[in-house]
Image (spheres, rainbow, N blue to C red):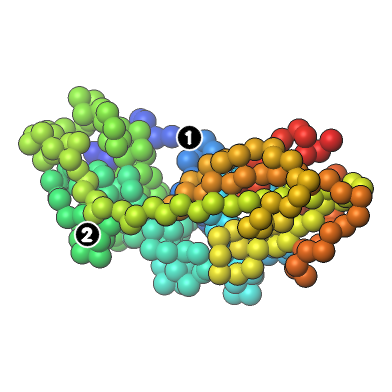
Amino acid sequence: MSFATTIIQWFREHGRDLPWRDTCDPYAIWLSEIILQQTRIEQGRPYWERFMRRWPTVNDLAAASEDEVLREWQGLGYYSRARNLHAAAKQVVAMGGFPTTIEGLRALKGVGDYTAAAIGSFAFGLPAAVVDGNVYRVLSRHFGIATPINTTEGKKEFALLAQELLPPSLTGRAGVGLLSSLTGRAGVGLYNQGMMDFGATLCTPQSPQCLQCPLQETCVAFREGRVQQLPVKEKKLQVKERHLIYIYIRVNGYTALHRRPAGDIWQGLYEPWLTDEVPSGAVLLRQHVKHVLTHRILYADFWLWELSERPTLPDDYFWVKVEELDNYAVPRLIEKLFENEKMRE
């Protein structure tokens, strides 16, 4: 039995039941793929459901404001995804609909090789192999490939291998048996989704279920005792630390916010006064709150400064009612600040 046949048969029995798999609507599929970039399914699923309820079509999403989209996205992190999502929705509307080629899909804001292959194969049956972290792991272990997956050489090697593994019947050529009955959209989607689920639930990073694996007999890593050594990654960049001081100012039911500019973390999100010095009279609420980003660890101190008159602040700050703070999308770090009950008293 071929590699692809085994994956499809396994997926039919063990694949995860997810709502965006019950449709060929490219909007629903694209939305799920963007949300699930760097987000676990159990965390991302409620967001997908909320977005689909509030904006059921790409036209609805394109007509929303960026602030509305960022507010709905709040808590997911990596907010450039939300801004790209909104921009891409406008692109699709301007085009008159979703592109039906891999090249066209890749031209959408925030859509790379993996996302284009996922949308293209799931929605349109395009013969494009998806390559994500799960696929890297399955291929690296099964074929015993030690090329680092986070290098240019590794990305090219695994992309070529993944595409080659698409069997003839899934790439429009003649096929027999099980695969020949899965030509077109269904076959491509089943195989790609099978590869993703296989890596996510069976061939996992830690404690993979090798004894239950249908590919055990042909797996190089299992045979050579290298399962925990593969895949290989080059060492990450050094993580830097950054210390922040936030002052939550409260004056007669109002507080000050500003919107973070382009070119820095949390672009387009709102935050209270960020300063280098604590003003006299401020009260410490929380100290050294830790927030981890990809290549940076933030430590924030939160202070409350209650006054009878508004202080002079930089020009980009503005005043809002405390009870209206929920209308503004904020980074998760600031959300932790506002979760403090004392902030709303």
Q: Name the quadrant containing residue 101.
A: bottom left
Q: Which residue is mark 1?
A: 17
Identified at 59% across, 58% down, the residue is 266
Left or right: 16 in relation to 287: left
For residue 28, say whether it is visible: no
Q: Residue at x 33, y 48 (%)?
A: 133
In this rendering, which labeled residue sits more in front, label 1 or label 2?
A: 2
Give the secondary structure at mark 1. loop
Residue 229 visible to an observer of this rendering: yes
Task: Indicate the quadrant containing the N terminus: top left, top right, bottom left or bottom right.
Answer: top left
Residue 154 badge = 2
Q: Position of residue 179 (x, y in %)?
A: 27, 47
What's the residue type where badge 1 is placed? Asp
* Residue in view at x 67 percent, y 44 percent: 302
Label 2's element? helix
Badge 2 local density, few (<14 within 10 Å), some, or many (20+)?
some
